Image (cartoon, rainbow, N blue to C red):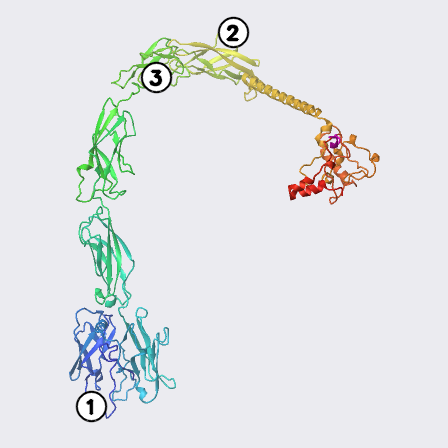
Amino acid sequence: MFSLHEGSGLLLLLLLAGLQIAAEARGAPPCNPGFSEDLYTVVVPDITEKGWPLFNVKFVSCGRGGLVRFECNNPSDFRIEDNGVVYAARTLQRTPAPALPLLIKAVDTATQQQWVTQVKMMPPTQVQELAVPPVMSRNFKEIVFPSQNADSTLKRIKRDWVIPPINVPENFRGPFPHELVRIRSDHDKNRSLRYSVTGPGADQPPTGIFTISPISGELSVNKPLDREHIPSFHLRAHAVDLNGNQVENPIDIVINVIDMNDNRPEFTHQIWNGTVPEGSKPGTFVMTVTSIDKDDPKTQNGILRYKILSQNPESPSSNMFTINNKTGGIITVAAGLDREKVPQYTLIIQATDMEGSPMYGLSNTATAVIRVTDINDNPPEFTAETFSGEVPENAVNVIVANLTVTDKDQPNTPAWNAVYKITGGDPTGRFSVPTDPITNEGLVTVVKPIDYEISRTYVLTVEARNEVSLARGIHPPKQSTATVSIKVTDVNESPYFDPNPKLIRLEEGMLPESTLTMFTAQDPDRFMQQTIRYSKLSDLANWLRIDPNTGRISTIAILDRESPYVKNSLYNATFLATDNGKIPASGTGTLQIYLVDINDNAPKVYPHEAEICEKPEPNAINITALDGDLNPNAGPFAFELPHRPQDVKRNWTLTRLNGDYAQMSLKIGFLESGIYEVPIIITDSGNLPMSNTSYLRIKVCQCDMNGDCTDQQHIMAAGLGTGAIISILLCIIILLILVLMFVVWMKRRDKERQAKQLLIDPEDDVRDNILKYDEEGGGEEDQDYDLSQLQQPDTLEPDAIKPVGIRRLDERPLHPEPQYPMRSAAPHPGDIGDFINEGLKAADNDPTAPPYDSLLVFDYEGSGSTAGSLSSLNSSSSGGDQDYDYLNDWGPRFRKLADMYGGSDD
């Protein structure tokens, strides 16, 4: 079977791995039952989870087997199995106080014999503090593979051992390889075996950390371990023979990397920002700082403690804040936070592991910046007790005074923004005090008109507050209230009519120069001695007149209720009152005249025109009357036909239908077609009734079966009035005048064009010549037109009379001249294009035209000139007699000129 050897020393990296389950062979010395050690010293982690195997004790049973029962003196924390392996009964955490030794008792259930041993448990840190090097001696314990068939008197199969973890400290520096345990099988006595381990760290990544001697079974570590990288390794040990056959079941080996304090705490932020209201009570939470340690948090290496190293500024106390050493929570510890004095604090926070041990712990620092936030602990205070201002009467939305305050709170915050309230002196609400959002000043503003004649001064009491209430326990001082004295100045106010408008009731028909009423205005300026004059501002019908001094209104025309300027029997006229102040002021008043109707309008027939058939059946005309008066001066009406002319009553009959309507019809059996003017007498019902004779224009016509006229005549000529006919005639006359003017203008334009053509000399007509300017090509003979057009034929000499040999080198050759087209003296403008095309064809067929690459003649003007030669201007001496040798003395530039003119003829 396998056995595991553990090195001696205070640091025991492996506890006892198992108990011997078989007795020695026959003939062995007598067996003494009991524990293998009287005192076991083991290393356990600082924190142990429930169910973890911690260690095991070896008990020599001498064949007693299951008759031995194990007990411990602390069953609430530890549990021991029958095989001697001790487990954690709950999650255990080491306390600073030294632990008492654990007592383990073995009891023989048959004989009640007892054996006791002690176990001293030691944490890894204590081993470090004692400076015990984490090394192991060569005196190994063995991990023995459990036997499946023992050759002893015991005929039972033992279950596999539970091997406690092997603890290896991280950062161990060697020498390497460093042996940890020895694995052995009982079968190595009879044959040669080979041992191996598998798992991460051995044959799986990261490979090569652990190796095993295949012959001796010594398991070794080959390099330093890092718990923060891999906290534990799980390996499996194997035993095979030389043929590779498995001789033992694999056993699991757990290697825990024991944490060492090799990492400093690291703050998650180097600068922490927090806020706390000013005036906060002690114990007010500010913020929490956090630090992380990569070491095992279940050991002292990863347990951090916080503290404040410094505070800046140290006002009003050097210990204004404290920190929870475990959680990192910062709270206030003293009163007196005042933003107006100290707006910000800077704390240096330190985090230390090893539970804050200043000797063994590693530490790090961070900065905590605590900003003291403002609260409304300072009320606004006026800069003066009294403010003053002045305002003219009747002015509105005018700023009278600016109220200034001071506030020590943070500007542009609700605790600083001022709100003003008028608490006295303004019962009618004529003032308000809004706040200037930029300067925080109070703007005393007039919101309702002020009358100087009523009140000349105002004394206001104004209180200043903030947008938020003052902090608890703070009361507004006297300086938060001020007095504002406002003086009202008198101005010239406009006169006013009272009442306005003024309504009077009169009968229509009042004669001119009748006095209607007095319409006067009042001057509100009681303290100014002023007079008022009146004038008429609006009188659409021009019926009224007002006395400029007294305001008496009289008529200048008859008042007529039926006038178009009267609406609903009301006539409105507007008058103006003006005082004689330095700056005159005026006011308007409206006079409304209600005109009572009188019977002054006679009724008239309606409609004025009608149609009726020649025969009385089945036609009739319904008529009514129009009266401009109102009831009872209008209907009901009385309709009747006059006695004269006599044919009216002979031809027509009039029947009254009701008080407003009557019916007109033919009285005779037939009436010739035509238009008849029928007089009708209509009388209204007014007191002193009025009668009127109106004429009804009736068209008598031939009718169809439906009673409609069939002829084309109408009462009005074609339905068009005289005004429409005149308008049509005027339009026709205007159109004729416009057409006549256009024709005259066209004829005049043609005459001017013909006169301009007559003034042009045919020989000077530039259209006969083709001119080309800015030519830099082959000259005139290279163009597509005839140069002979530019010559003067009268001055040309016949070629026959020219002697041979005196022709110019650049003169045109003697060939027949091409026949170029000739233009008339006064051509039509449309033949210019034809002329150019013909000239182009003639130039293309001209054999005397030189090619483009030949010697070209420029500015050829013929063989003679009417101007004569310039040689006729005799000079004092000829060029041949002149001596040009003196030019040689003028320099090299003039020598060439001297050679040209001073040389011989050669």
Query: Which of the pair 876/566 is nearer the observer?
Result: 876
Over which residues does the magenta segment extend?
867-873
Whole-number angstrom distance, CA of label 3 to CA of label 1 = 149 Å
Question: Is 807 above or below relative to 640?
Answer: below
Q: Position of residue 435 (x, y in %)?
A: 27, 36
Circle 1 packing at 10 Å, graded few (<14), some (14-19), many (20+), is few
The three-letter amino acid code for the residue at tag 1 is: Pro
Q: How many marks?
A: 3
The three-letter amino acid code for the residue at tag 3 is: Leu
Query: Which of the pair 101/595 is nearer the observer?
Result: 101
Whole-number angstrom distance, CA of label 2 to CA of label 1 = 183 Å
Q: Residue furthest right?
A: 800
Q: Secondary structure at mark 3?
A: strand
Q: Position of residue 703 (x, y in %)?
A: 56, 19
Q: Quadrant of residue 814?
A: top right
Q: Position of residue 5 (x, y in %)?
A: 27, 82
Circle 2 packing at 10 Å, graded few (<14), some (14-19), many (20+), is few
- Residue contact between numbered discs 2 and 3, judged by CB atoms under 8 Å: no
The C terminus sits in image quarter = top right
Residue identified by numbered label 2: 646
The N terminus sits in image quarter = bottom left
Tell me if residue 43 can be seen: yes
Query: Which of the pair 193/379 is nearer the observer?
Result: 379
Residue identified by numbered label 1: 30
